[in-house]
Amino acid sequence: MSSNDNIVFRAEAGGALRGRVRVPGDKSISHRSIMLGALADGVTEVSGFLEGEDCLATIGAFRAMGVCIDGPEHGRVTVHGVGLHGLRAPSGPLYMGNSGTSMRLLAGLLAGQAFDVVMTGDASLTRRPMKRVAEPLRKMGALIETSPGGTPPLRITGKQNLQGIVYSMPVASAQVKSSLLLAGLYAEGQTWVTEPAPTRDHTERMLTGFGYEVEREGHTVGVEGGGHLRAANIDVPADISSAAFFMVGAAIAPGSDLTLEHVGVNPTRIGVVNILKAMGADITLSNERLVGGEPVADIRVRASRLRGIRIPEDQVPLAIDEFPALFIAAACAEGETVLTGAEELRVKESDRIQVMADGLSALGVEAKPTPDGMVIQGGALKDGRINSHGDHRIAMAFAMAALRAGGPVVIDDCANVRTSFPNFLGLAGAAGLQVEQVT
Ligand code: S3P
């Protein structure tokens, strides 16, 4: 089945979320486990791997470049590393599906190879901006072409001598930072990247875990080319971005008491917890521990009255994937919620500002999109039909909205839920959301 089939979800109104749930593995860490495992010397064993289409696209790309990868089976993957210079030319274009992370990170990694490669993607990925990686990579000496609009396909010509650069990113993007650090592994000298605000630091942590030295000075990180990666075992925590739908569901649905187990709570990812707490959510973290260099905790959420807030801009990069869910929380809160400084939401898998505002309006919520955010008046939600525009996170967010809607919420174009959360319907159903796929 292709990702373009119109899968329709129907969520019944009401209910509560209760019990314990372990959502699938972290998408960012799963991608990186394959990338770094492939480039390492030795065999990397991964557990808790996210078997979603995005991460499978990354596996497919490395298999096409000659890397032997066993699995995934029940979240276990074995990557037989080929070393930094062991990749081989693929026989055709690498298809990245819906996955911006695969394409942007691989752009940097592939810029340093001795072969040419073309990367393509689905309709959504083909609209997403790639200049943000292509431009700095060119400064490093990469030969990389986009379409005239700066979008995929990406054509990378190999055998270039990359040079380290000092680069200050105009947007706070972990994908751009990671792409440049991966290119930096192949560059002569040092590559330094400065971010305007902290973004997820999994690449830095994982490079360190694979024995590669990463230097940090404030908002700047650097690597020096010419080293080696040593295979490492990775235990992928549950994805806080997937847990976010359940956190919001439990916060808004009266009678809920839900614990999300083994969730990654890296400080660069916990904006959703901070924002929900500021809205009055009842959230407690327990069993906090470090797993393979990443902080992990169980997160308990009990229903409470939420109030609208002005979301602090410094939380935006720390919650960048969670705004579809957070907008649902805002719609169920008392008073006004104002988001600013989040123009990046317009270039995610969909334009998440417009698509969420349209969906909220369809449910009778006053939601005013602005160029860089949204103003939402909390109130009653009615039943309605939502177009998710093929965006996995929009689909899952509106499924949770049904918990507080006056009637069923029907959501079109949900096939891409399997890019990040293959068993969403099963887990949501087990927790107490009445949701099913109707076509
Ligand atoms: C990701 C970084 C974020 C995020 C994406 C995954 C990553 O993108 O939205 O889902 O794994 O590095 P940006 O860095 O473009 O904000």
Image (cartoon, grey):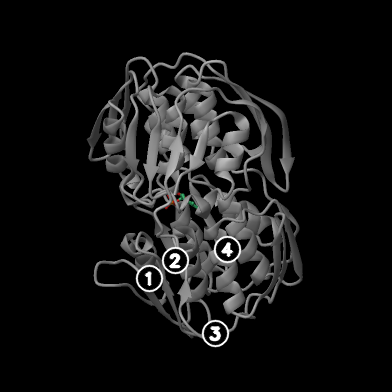
Say which residue appears at 48% left-offset and 25% top-offset.
276
Q: Mark 4 points at which residue?
A: 56
Instruction: Indicate the amino acid at tag 3.
Output: Ala
Locate residue 402, reporting x and y percent: 43, 29
Q: How crowded is mark 3: few (under 14 residues within 10 Å), some or many (20 or more)?
A: some
Pick the front one: 10 or 326: 10
Q: Of label 4 and label 1, which has the lower sequence position?
A: 4
Circle 4 SS class: helix
Distance from the alpha carbon under mark 4 to that under mark 1: 31 Å
Say which residue appears at 68% left-offset and 49% top-offset.
236
User: In the shown orientation, is residue 236 left or right of residue 216?
Assistant: right
Locate residue 111, reporting x and y percent: 47, 75
Say which residue appears at 44% left-offset and 49% top-offset.
439
Q: How crowded is mark 2: few (under 14 residues within 10 Å), some or many (20 or more)?
A: many
Q: Mark 1 points at which residue?
A: 139
Circle 3 SS class: loop
Instruction: Indicate the amino acid at tag 1.
Output: Lys
Distance from the alpha carbon under mark 1 to that under mark 3: 24 Å
Pick the front one: 99 or 21: 21
Residue 341 visible, this angle: no
Distance from the alpha carbon under mark 1 to that under mark 2: 7 Å
Q: Of label 4 and label 2, which has the lower sequence position?
A: 4
Locate residue 146, reporting x and y percent: 32, 72
Distance from the alpha carbon under mark 3 to that under mark 2: 26 Å
The residue carrying mark 1 has its beta carbon less than 8 Å from ligand 1? no
Against 272, is 81 above or below? below
Q: Mark 2 points at which residue?
A: 165
Pick the front one: 27 or 401: 401
Q: Of label 1 and label 3, which has the lower sequence position?
A: 3
Q: Which mark is residue 89?
A: 3
Q: Of label 1 and label 2, which has the lower sequence position?
A: 1
Locate residue 331, reporting x and y percent: 36, 24
